[in-house]
């Protein structure tokens, strides 16, 4: 049978106008109705989630004003559409690799 705790964590977590705690879920839908600088809460990068990967859907992505230093991009997106989909991988407590999905 499927581990319920794992299944709950892999369910989509909906968040509005707040930073994402990557230790709370794997996949997210973030809705932004106001400007935000920090998308991911750096305090959520705990040893337990190193190796985690998932998807972040951002509605209202044009409200993102920047990215934290621990987010590593192949190419930093600057021409954001209203809805963006990002894949991420937590490599360490100081490195989250992200790319447009």
Image (tube, rainbow, N blue to C red):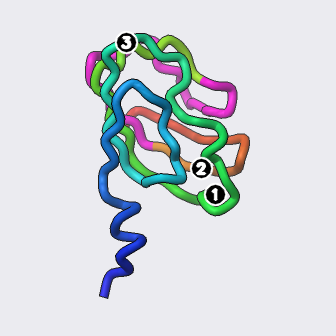
Circles 3 and 2: CB distance less than 8 Å? Answer: no
Q: Which residues are magenta?
A: 68-87
SS assignment at label 1: loop
Callout 1 crowding tier (Cα within 10 Å): few <14, some 14–19, many ≥20: some
Tag shown at residue 50: 1
Q: Where does label 2 land, which residue?
A: 90
Residue under the image location 61 percent in, 41 percent down: 96
Distance, label 1 to label 3, CA atoms, is 30 Å
Could you say where residue 95 lies in the image, as x and y percent from the top left?
A: 68, 41
Main SS category, magenta section: loop
Q: Horizontally, is 56 left or right of 91 in the view?
A: left
Which quarter of the figure has residue 79?
top left
For the N terminus, the quadrant is: bottom left
Disc with the residue nearer the chain's start (1 vs 2): 1
Disc with the residue nearer the chain's start (3 vs 2): 3
SS assignment at label 2: strand
Circles 1 and 2: CB distance less than 8 Å? Answer: yes
Could you say where residue 55 lies in the image, as x and y percent from the top left?
A: 38, 45
Residue under the image location 61 percent in, 46 percent down: 44
Using the image, determine if residue 59 lies above or below residue 85: above
Could you say where residue 66 lies in the image, as x and y percent from the top left?
A: 55, 15
Q: Where does label 3 land, which residue?
A: 34
Which quarter of the figure has residue 4?
bottom left
Using the image, determine if residue 73 lies above or below residue 25: above
Q: Horizontally, is 95 left or right of 52 in the view?
A: right
């Amino acid at each position: 049978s499927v581990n319920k705790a794992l299944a709950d964590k892999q369910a989509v977590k909906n968040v509005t106008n707040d930073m994402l705690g990557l230790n709370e879920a794997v996949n997210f839908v973030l809705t932004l109705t106001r400007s935000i600088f920090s998308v991911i809460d750096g305090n959520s990068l705990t040893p337990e989630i190193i190796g985690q990967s998932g998807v972040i859907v951002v509605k209202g992505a044009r409200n993102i004003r920047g990215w934290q230093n621990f987010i590593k991009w192949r190419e930093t997106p600057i021409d954001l559409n209203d809805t963006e989909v990002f894949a991420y991988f937590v490599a360490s407590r100081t490195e989250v690799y992200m790319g447009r999905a």
